[in-house]
Image (cartoon, grey):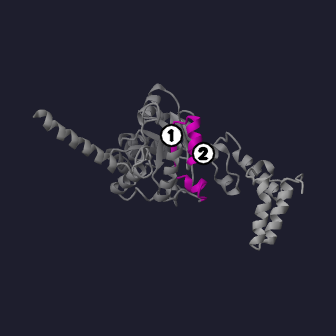
């Protein structure tokens, strides 16, 4: 009796399992689901690993990326963190500031980077206008960067009390946050342009987060739960003070050598942009590790000249052939269609490709 009862139950479980498998059969095995990628220790760099590097005193590397090719290059180079920065507004979209870029535009960049960078920790910038109104707006935008952009963490510019509150709310919602102090490009309307910060006693104290101004500082961002803070365009001694005061890593950009790590904009460090407009906005602190822009310009000029001269494409880059035995038949079919001029052009091309062919 027990055996006969077990058979129907086994059959039921088998049918149920089959139903479940069939209902999932339209889902690709390796589908990219909405949200962060798998963060196994031998693949994606994690926030925990970044903290461990900081604890060991190992420098942290971060570079911006905005598309699949740049992400692949960061991946191959072993960069720790890929920042999908709102600087895309300037170096990709050609704006004068970072302010115009939208969250939807940022999501396009995030998804492209996520497809190309398999190893780095992925951090997406919250763009201006998408987290300042309320904590709810900030959380909603951050969630979209993870669910729709496949980011692992977000970055926001700190300073005003509302932004510190936003950072805290996002962390409490279960999302890792990187802060940003010093020159905060989204605040250029208040700062009066892209100006270095912390160059006098009052502003240095403000950057360091001492006393009554703690809500606008790196310490406030640490207290809000940020796992790291970017220090931009501050004097090295100020950056050293902040780095010493914090228990989380600092990532410097134009902040000297005393930070826990460094970040540069992809286009800047590669020397990609040669347009006069970009020359005006390339920061003084950026070292160009290559002159990729010169290589690109030369390649484009060479291409143009070869096309004009007719040397490209030559035989080496015209790999698709028609069987010589079929040439006459092809010409005949063109003539039957009344395309005598086309037949003549094809015959002339055949002669140029194989001038030694006997007639």
Which span is picked out in magenta?
68-94
Q: Mark 1 points at which residue?
A: 118
| Residue 52 pos. (x, y %) | 43, 29
Mark 1 neighbour density, 10 Å: few (under 14) some (14–19) many (20 or more)? many
| Residue 296 pos. (x, y %) | 72, 49
Q: Is residue 235 visible?
A: no
Q: Is residue 136 magenta?
A: no
Relative to 161, is 319 on the left or the right? Answer: right
Dividing the picture into quarters, in which one does residue 199 lie?
top right
Mark 2 neighbour density, 10 Å: few (under 14) some (14–19) many (20 or more)? many
| Residue 147 pos. (x, y %) | 39, 50
* The C terminus sits in image quarter: bottom right
Question: Which secondary structure, mark 1?
Answer: loop
Q: Look at 51% across and 45% down and name the residue there.
A: 83
Question: Which secondary structure, mark 2?
Answer: helix
Along the line of sight, which residue is nearer the eye, 343 or 210? 343
Along the line of sight, which residue is nearer the eye, 289 or 229? 289
Residue lying farthest to the left in this orientation: 1
Q: Is residue 90 magenta?
A: yes
Along the line of sight, which residue is nearer the eye, 49 or 207? 49
**For residue 256, above or below residue 333:** above
**Mark 1 vs mark 2: in front:** 1
Relative to 73, is 307 on the left or the right? Answer: right
For marks 1 and 2, the one nearer the N-term is 1
**For residue 202, above or below residue 188:** above
| Residue 231 pos. (x, y %) | 50, 42
Along the line of sight, which residue is nearer the eye, 104 or 225? 104
Q: Mark 2 points at which residue?
A: 266
* The N terminus sits in image quarter: top left
Q: Look at 63% across and 47% down and name the residue there.
A: 267
Residue 183: numbered disc: none
Q: Is residue 213 visible?
A: yes
């Amino acid at each position: 009796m027990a055996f006969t009862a077990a058979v129907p139950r086994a059959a039921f479980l088998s049918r149920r399992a089959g139903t479940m498998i069939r209902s999932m059969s339209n889902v690709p095995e390796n589908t990219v689901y909405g949200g962060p990628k798998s963060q196994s220790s031998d693949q994606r760099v994690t926030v925990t690993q970044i903290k461990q590097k900081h604890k060991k005193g190992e420098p942290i590397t971060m570079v911006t990326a905005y598309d699949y090719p740049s992400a692949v290059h960061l991946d191959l180079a072993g960069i720790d963190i890929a920042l999908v920065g709102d600087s895309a507004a300037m170096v990709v979209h050609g704006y004068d500031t970072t302010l115009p870029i939208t969250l939807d535009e940022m999501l396009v960049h995030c998804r492209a980077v996520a497809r190309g960078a398999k190893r780095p920790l992925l951090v997406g910038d919250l763009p201006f206008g998408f987290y300042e109104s309320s904590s709810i707006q900030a959380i909603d935008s951050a969630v979209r960067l993870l669910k729709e952009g496949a980011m692992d963490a977000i970055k926001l510019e700190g300073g005003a009390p509302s932004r510190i509150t936003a950072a805290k709310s996002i962390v409490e919602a279960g999302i890792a946050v990187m802060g940003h102090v010093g020159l905060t490009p989204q605040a250029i309307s208040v700062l009066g342009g892209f100006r270095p910060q912390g160059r006098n006693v009052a502003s240095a104290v403000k950057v360091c987060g001492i006393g009554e101004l703690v809500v606008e500082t790196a310490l406030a961002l640490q207290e809000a739960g940020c796992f790291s803070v970017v220090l931009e365009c501050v004097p090295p001694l100020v950056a050293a003070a902040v780095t010493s005061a914090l228990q989380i890593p600092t990532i410097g950009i134009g902040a000297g050598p005393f930070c826990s790590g460094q970040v540069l904009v992809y286009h800047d460090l590669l020397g990609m942009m040669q347009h006069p407009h970009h020359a005006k906005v390339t920061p003084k602190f950026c070292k160009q590790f290559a002159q990729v822009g010169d290589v690109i310009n030369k390649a484009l000029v060479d291409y143009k000249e070869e096309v004009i001269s007719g040397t490209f494409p030559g035989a080496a880059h015209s790999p698709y052939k028609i069987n010589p035995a079929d040439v006459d038949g092809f010409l005949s079919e063109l003539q039957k269609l009344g395309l005598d001029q086309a037949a003549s052009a094809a015959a002339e091309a055949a002669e140029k490709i194989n001038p030694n062919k006997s007639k």
